[in-house]
């Protein structure tokens, strides 16, 4: 679906398609434990977030050089452009790469090769959001933020991802305070598999401006009321929710109820290579399966720009 839209919830490592994974494996002399792309695709039957994350981290082994990260980002941007994405705020997971012996510079410089030319090459403006892995320690997150000091001109904000349950936002209070002092924007995954309380904590303790997923807010009417009142954007990822069994089927997805409740929802692809669709595919799926009207789709597209960090750039320039 080519409606112009912004993508606000996209893990660049989750755009690694099987074909590119094998190409990079060959280029870098990495052996993948799958015979071919078909065998790899068969491993994409996830039972929950963790079962996905295991494969997501395993396949990162093929990403070794700046060129690999540039190729990965260019492949995503080309696909996103074809589906109407005009602006993308892109997550990356530095700790997962540093743990494999790569430098943060390799990752950021590589991504920047693609992002720096993205408006010219793909008609997409971009921002980079550095995520901390919540199943790693708070100290590790702080070290990662320190290591990012030379790259802060390229990093717009910080996020929080990976295994949610048992790793509440509170664990990362200090690093989010440090990020705020550096002028970085703040978002966090909350309420994907974790309880509604994690959403409240992300807002109150981490000071996030947007909540990634936030799906489980629907279990707490007072929280829904607050999110509506404060116009907190939620970056929903419907196809991801189906593949990770957060909802039983797409037809059961609460997006229509969330829009009816007045929540500021956006629709995004999360890890499109793994979950069966890019941003436009997610729009098409909710149109087809949830019966969202054209007006609702336009509302979602408008929300995506309003909830983006572009908005504030423009407001700041106007002041
Ligand atoms: N949830 C949490 N962490 C992630 C995800 C996700 O969907 N994708 C990549 N890291
Ligand atoms: Zn995500």
Image (cartoon, rainbow, N blue to C red):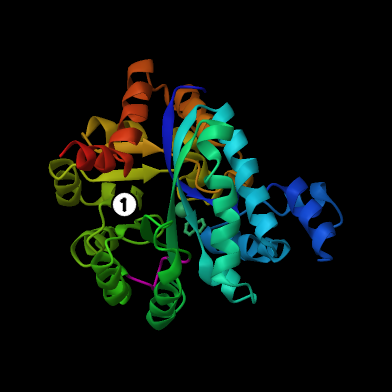
Span colored in magenta: 163-168
Quadrant position of residue 141: bottom left
The residue lying toward the viewer, choosing from 307 and 251, is: 307
**Residue at mark 1: C-beta within 8 A of ligand 2:** no
Residue 232, image x, y percentages:
22, 46
Residue 165 falls inside the magenta stretch: yes
* Image position of 198 (left or right of 192): left
The residue lying toward the viewer, choosing from 217 and 146, is: 146
Q: Is residue 142 above or below residue 154?
A: below
Among all residues in the image, which is located at the extreme top?
Answer: 294
Which residue bears the numbered disc 1? 211
* Image position of 244 (left or right of 9): right
- Does residue 277 show up? no
The residue lying toward the viewer, choosing from 155 and 306, is: 155
Residue 122, image x, y percentages:
56, 33
- Does residue 222 show up? yes
């Amino acid at each position: 679906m080519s409606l112009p839209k912004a993508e606000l919830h996209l893990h660049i490592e989750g755009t690694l398609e099987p074909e590119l994974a094998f190409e990079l494996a060959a280029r870098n002399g990495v052996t993948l434990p799958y015979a071919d792309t078909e065998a790899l695709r068969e491993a994409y039957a996830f039972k929950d977030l963790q079962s996905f994350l295991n494969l997501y981290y395993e396949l990162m082994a093929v990403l070794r050089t700046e060129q690999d990260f540039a190729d990965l980002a260019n492949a995503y941007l080309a696909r996103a452009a074809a589906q109407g994405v005009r602006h993308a705020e892109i997550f990356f997971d530095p700790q997962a790469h540093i743990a494999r012996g790569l430098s943060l510079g390799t990752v950021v410089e590589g991504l920047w090769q693609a992002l720096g030319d993205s408006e010219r090459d793909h008609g997409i403006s971009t921002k980079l959001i550095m995520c901390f892995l919540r199943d790693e320690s708070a100290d590790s997150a702080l070290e990662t933020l320190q290591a990012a000091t030379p790259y802060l001109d390229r990093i717009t904000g910080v996020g929080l991802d990976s295994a949610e349950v048992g790793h509440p936002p509170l664990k990362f209070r200090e690093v989010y305070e440090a990020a705020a002092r550096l002028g970085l924007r703040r978002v966090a995954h909350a309420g994907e598999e974790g309880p509604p309380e994690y959403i409240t904590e992300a807002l109150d303790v981490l000071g996030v401006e947007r909540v990634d997923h936030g799906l489980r807010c629907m279990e707490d009417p007072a929280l829904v009321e607050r999110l509506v009142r404060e116009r907190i954007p939620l970056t929903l990822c419907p196809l991801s929710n189906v593949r990770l069994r957060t909802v039983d089927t797409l037809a059961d997805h609460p997006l229509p109820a969330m829009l009816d409740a007045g929540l500021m929802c956006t629709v995004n692809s999360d890890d499109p290579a793994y979950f069966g669709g890019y941003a436009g595919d997610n729009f098409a799926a909710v149109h087809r399966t949830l019966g969202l009207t054209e007006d609702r789709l336009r509302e979602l597209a408008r929300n995506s720009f309003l909830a983006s960090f572009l908005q504030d750039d423009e407001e700041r320039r106007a002041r």
